[in-house]
Image (tube, rainbow, N blue to C red):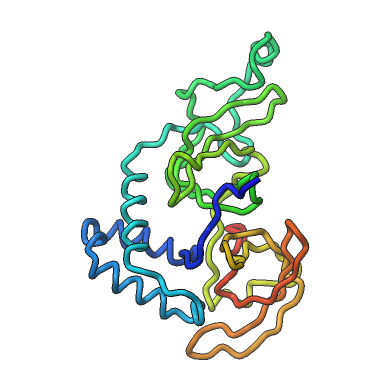
Amino acid sequence: MARLRPREVPRFTKAEILEMDKILHEQGEKCFNPDFCGKLARKFSRAEGRAGKPAIQWKLVQDWFEKRKKACATPPISLPVAPKELVAPVDTSVLNNGLPNSTVLPQGDKLLDLSDLEFEAKSSKDGAWYDVAFFLTHRILKSGEPEALVRFVGFGAEEDEWVNVKRSIRERSIPLEPSECECVKVGDIVLCYQESTDQAIYFDARVESIERRLHDIRGCRCLFMVRYVHDNNEETVRLRRLCRRPSY
């Protein structure tokens, strides 16, 4: 079975997506100008982390802004289900009354204002975490498990996916800054940017060891050996490829 969202290199890092989101909010229509996109593409391409890799093209930047604006223009349906099991009470007698395997709850019973929170969801197809743009709707399975239909940032409706609310939705991880280097300890679970020849996506990983180095003008020079949770493979990475959980 093909992966749900194959990524071609080059692609944007999580930090670059956060930056472009901010730029789109502040600059508006200026973001679609080819010259503006070209300058931003060159900035990304010259970043230290892209040394020896294909350059970002201006059209890729422009396409991202256009897709993001279109996605933001589509109002999401309110979701009364939050990752911390804030689920509306369900009449189990109705669920067990010969209905299909799932039932969609009324969408008017909003329990929590999620407008100030940002989330990420884990795809069941590749086990990677993607930023959530919208919660489209929700349902409770006969098993009692809540699921949400999510739209991922940077992707269209064809990539919408039902995900388990308890296990596969959480507050969005935060890119680590050089000043936060000391916050990372051996044994921590982090979100790590994994690159290969055909994709570059984020997976949970455990920090196995840390080689502390002096920081310089380029920032943190420490080396972090991580073990990916999904396949137990190990890799040594720089801080720029790690994101922390909001609970730090």
Residue ID at (67%, 43%):
167
Which quadrant is the N terminus positioned in? top right
Give the answer, above or below, for where 212 lies relative to 168: below
**Could you tell me how many numbered marks the image carries?**
0
Task: In the displayed orientation, state which residue is furthest to the front.
Answer: 1
Q: Residue furthest top?
A: 97
Given residues 114 and 169, the one toward you in this image is: 169
Residue at 48% from the left image edge and 38% from the top image edge: 135
- The image shows residue 230 at horizontal and vertical percentages of 73, 56
Q: Is residue 208 above or below residue 139?
A: below
**Quadrant for the C terminus in the image:** bottom right
Give residue 10's position: percent from left, percent from top: 48, 67
Instruction: Looking at the picture, tell me which residue is in the foreground, 173 or 111.
Output: 173
> Residue drawn at (69%, 76%), measured in percent from left and top?
236
Hey, which quadrant is residue 99 in on the image? top right
Rendered location of residue 223, percent (x, y)? 66, 81
In terms of image quadrants, where is residue 30? bottom left
Where is residue 111? Give x, y as percent.
51, 31
Name which residue lies at 60% across and 33% down. 147
**Is residue 150 left or right of 92 when viewed as pictured?**
left
The answer to whether 207 appears left or right of 14 in the picture is right
